[in-house]
């Protein structure tokens, strides 16, 4: 990357010296053309009603960002949203009062990066990209991931906001651990993007279950559980009770079902059915999926009603209420 930047700058410098600034403008515009030659109309989808996050991703795609860049920009909106108590800064802490974040990304080449139990860093999806692109590994945990972040210019931030600390102190009075369906315990943002070239990539980021045990990691940073992309087939992302999603490797399952010919909608429904059939306790937790295939068809499904997917298509950002296994 550095080398590519250097070559690009040297070339631009050389052209400027010999032919003047006009030619630079041409070089820049043809660079833009190269990015935009794809004929696909960009698509972004994400879990829950994260309107702004999805719109940011959609506009980034429209302006020529590739699918991975757009997905990371999109989910960053929620990582930085202090009102969101289950993603990024402002996320609820664990039982000891520490906010720990999990995230992963996958690009259209099938490369993956992931970080788990990261403190003091807000944009953990961007950090997962660093793991993917700058290290020989797929997953880094805790201090190791945090140190990598500082080496790449991320700022140290206190993720526990005044409001989340207040809510935590209130929670300590009973210390009752009971996730509330659709409310505040699992609003993970999972996002799938298709760019002008028809390439698919995604990102998933969360603070996990509120007041989780110290060290607990859910599905979101687990490749194949919280997120999976196969650029030949499509992608899927999950939200909800991570333990249940991990046990059925939900996102990988959905992509494999699409490979076998199921539509994104049918694949999401089948993946939710697996959770429901295997767990008689399923009325007590939420699991929800979104999916997109290579043709740009999308789908979503959940156990409980109340889940929604945002969809940016043909430059329109729409909230789509999902059907649910327990719809009456
Ligand atoms: N789905 C988020 C989590 O369980 O951590």
Image (tube, rainbow, N blue to C red):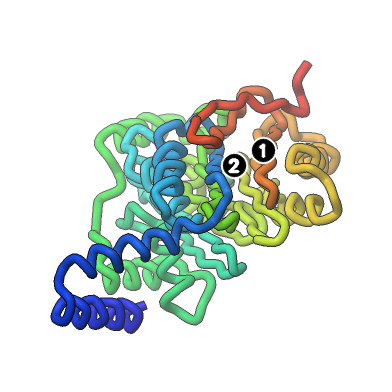
Q: Earlier in the sequence, mark 2 or mark 1?
A: 2
Instruction: Residue lying at the far top in this picture: please name it.
Output: 328
Q: Which mark is residue 287?
A: 1
Residue 209: numbered disc = none
Q: Would residue 263 be visible to someone looking at this image?
A: yes
Circles 2 and 1: CB atoms closer than 8 Å: yes
Image height check: is 14 above or below 291?
Answer: below
| Element on which disc 2 rests | strand
- Can you give x and y, in whole percent of width and height, for residue 277 in the image? 85, 39
> Where is residue 271, by image quadrant?
top right
Q: Nearer the viewer, residue 169 or 196?
A: 196
- Between 202 and 80, the residue placed more toward the observer is 202
Q: Which residue is mark 2?
A: 239
Q: Quadrant of residue 82?
A: top left
Which image quadrant: the C terminus?
top right
Distance (Cα) linking label 2 and label 1: 6 Å
> Residue visible at 68% across and 53% down?
234
Q: Residue at x 14, y 80 (%)?
A: 17
Image location of residue 85, percent across then percent down: 40, 36
Residue drawn at point x = 70 percent, y = 61 percent = 232
> Where's the N terminus, which quadrant?
bottom left
């Amino acid at each position: 990357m550095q080398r590519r930047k250097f070559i690009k700058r040297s070339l631009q410098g050389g052209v400027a010296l010999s032919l003047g600034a006009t030619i630079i403008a041409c070089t820049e515009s043809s660079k833009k053309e190269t990015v935009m030659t794809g004929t696909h109309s960009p698509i972004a989808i994400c879990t829950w009603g994260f309107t702004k996050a999805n719109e940011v991703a959609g506009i980034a795609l429209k302006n020529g960002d590739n699918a991975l860049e757009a997905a990371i920009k999109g989910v960053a909106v929620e990582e930085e949203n202090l009102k969101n108590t289950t993603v990024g800064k402002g996320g609820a802490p664990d039982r000891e009062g520490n906010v720990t974040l999990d995230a992963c990304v996958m690009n259209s080449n099938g490369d993956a990066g992931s970080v788990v139990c990261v403190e003091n860093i807000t944009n953990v999806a961007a950090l997962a990209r660093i793991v993917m692109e700058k290290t020989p590994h797929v997953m880094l945990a805790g201090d190791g991931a945090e140190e990598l972040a500082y080496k790449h210019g991320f700022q140290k931030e206190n993720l526990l906001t005044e409001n989340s600390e207040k809510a935590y102190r209130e929670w300590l009075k009973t210390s009752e651990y009971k996730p509330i369906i659709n409310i505040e315990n699992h609003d993970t943002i999972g996002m799938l993007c298709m760019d002008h070239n028809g390439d698919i990539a995604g990102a998933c980021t969360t603070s996990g279950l509120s007041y989780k045990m110290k060290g607990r990691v859910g599905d979101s940073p687990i490749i194949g559980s919280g997120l999976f992309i196969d650029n030949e087939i499509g992608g899927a992302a999950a939200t909800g009770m991570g333990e249940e999603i991990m046990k059925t490797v939900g996102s990988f399952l959905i992509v494999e079902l699409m490979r076998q010919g199921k539509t994104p909608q049918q694949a999401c429904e089948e993946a939710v059915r697996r959770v429901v059939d295997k767990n008689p306790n399923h009325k007590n937790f939420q699991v929800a999926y979104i999916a997109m295939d290579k043709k740009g068809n999308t789908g979503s499904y959940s156990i409980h009603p109340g889940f929604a997917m945002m969809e940016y298509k043909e430059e329109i950002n729409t909230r789509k209420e999902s059907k649910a296994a327990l719809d009456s």
